[in-house]
Image (tube, rainbow, N blue to C red):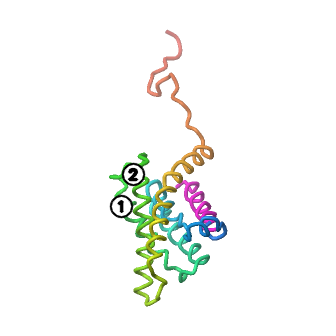
Amino acid sequence: MNWLPTTLILTIAFLAVFLEATVNGLRHLLGVQVDLLPGLMVYASLTCGLPTVGLLAVCGGLWFDSLSSNPLGISVLPLFLIGFVIQKYRGLILREQNFAQLVLGLAASAGAPVLTLLLLLNAEIQPLLGWFSLWQWFVVSLAGAAFTPLWFRFFDRLTHALSYRPLGETSFRPDRQIKRGRM
């Protein structure tokens, strides 16, 4: 198994969660903390296997919860459910199409906060909800949709830069017969 894509995805997830928590420009401008993990989960579930999806859900969810006001571990299950469903139906999804990436990113970014909210309400934790929450959900969904095709381009370039290029075909067929010796 090639661990390069898994290592790159987890490293970028760590950096994305760190940047979400430290860069406050968009948060002060729009009043929303953008979540980049659902779009990254879309990329991971369409290009890698279920172990990578599970690792990203657990590590990314715990990293995100440790730097936000969420209870620790509440984001793991929504991320895993998103990744599992996309992983299950990835044979039917057009991975290379930007529109499909955009729609999947929108669905994942809209679904992750809703699933997290359902888990919070089920755990009898009272989150702050109001009309401004709809604005936050709308902006988070659109930002996640916008970043998902960027994840595909970024990782395609990164993988192309860090992996070897296969050798081209030779002009000789491997099944040809070579006669040696005297005629």
Which numbered dot is residue 100?
Answer: 2
| Image mark for residue 154 | none
Give the mark, 2 or 1, whose residue is nearer the N terminus.
Answer: 1
- Relative to 63, say whether 156 is above or below: above
Q: Is residue 95 above or below residue 9?
A: above
Amino acid of disc 1: Lys
Q: Main secondary structure of the magenta part?
A: helix
Q: Residue at 59% x, 69% y: name it.
A: 27
Element carrying mark 1: helix
Q: Are marks 2 and 1 in contact (CB under 8 Å)?
A: no
- Name the residue tied to disc 1: 88
Residue at the far top in the pictured view: 183
Q: Residue at x 59, y 57 (%)?
A: 8
x then y, percent, for residue 109: 45, 65
Which percent across, then down, holds residue 179? Answer: 49, 17
The amino acid pointed to by label 2 is: Ala
Pinpoint residue 7: horizontal percent, then vertical percent.
59, 59
Looking at the image, the residue that sits furthest to the right is 22
Magenta stretch?
A: 1-19
Query: For residue 68, what is the image quadrant?
Result: bottom right
In the rendered image, residue 164 lying in the magenta stretch gets the answer no
Tag 2 secondary structure: helix
How far across and down, in percent of the image, does residue 23 sit? 66, 66
Question: Which is more toward the observer, 176 or 19?
Answer: 19
